[in-house]
Image (tube, rainbow, N blue to C red):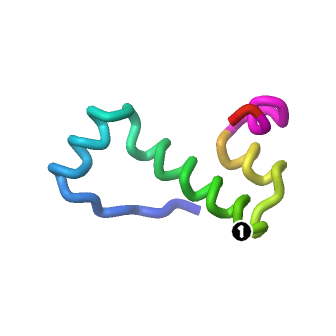
Amino acid sequence: MEVTLHVPHDVAKRLTAAGGDVSRRALEALALEGYREHALALYQVSEMLGLSRVETEDF
């Protein structure tokens, strides 16, 4: 599934300056929140982020 977020240009610019890829940061936030709420299992977070199990545990 693809999701489109509309972020004001000035906000996106600040987020990019603060830490790089805004799309990746949004995906990571969604995965972490899903895991925190027990809506996602660790393997699903790994799949979403394209990480190994060990990399996900370190994340």
Percent x, y for residue 1?
Answer: 59, 62
Percent x, y for residue 48?
Answer: 68, 49
Q: Label 1's element?
A: loop
The number of callouts visible is 1
Rendered position, 39 above or below 49:
below
Q: Camera-side residue: 43 or 33?
A: 33
Q: Quadrant of residue 31?
A: bottom right
The residue that label 1 is drawn on is 37
The residue carrying pointer 1 sits among few (fewer than 14), some (14 to 19) or many (20 or more) residues within 10 Å by Cα, namely few
- Whether the magenta-drawn stretch holds residue 18 is answered as no
Residue appearing at x 49%, y 42% in the figure: 24
Rendered position, 58 above or below 28:
above
Residue appearing at x 22%, y 51% in the figure: 11
Rendered position, 35 above or below 14:
below
Rendered position, 9 above or below 55:
below
Which residues are drawn in magenta? 50-57
Q: Quadrant of residue 22?
A: top left
Q: Camera-side residue: 42 or 23?
A: 42
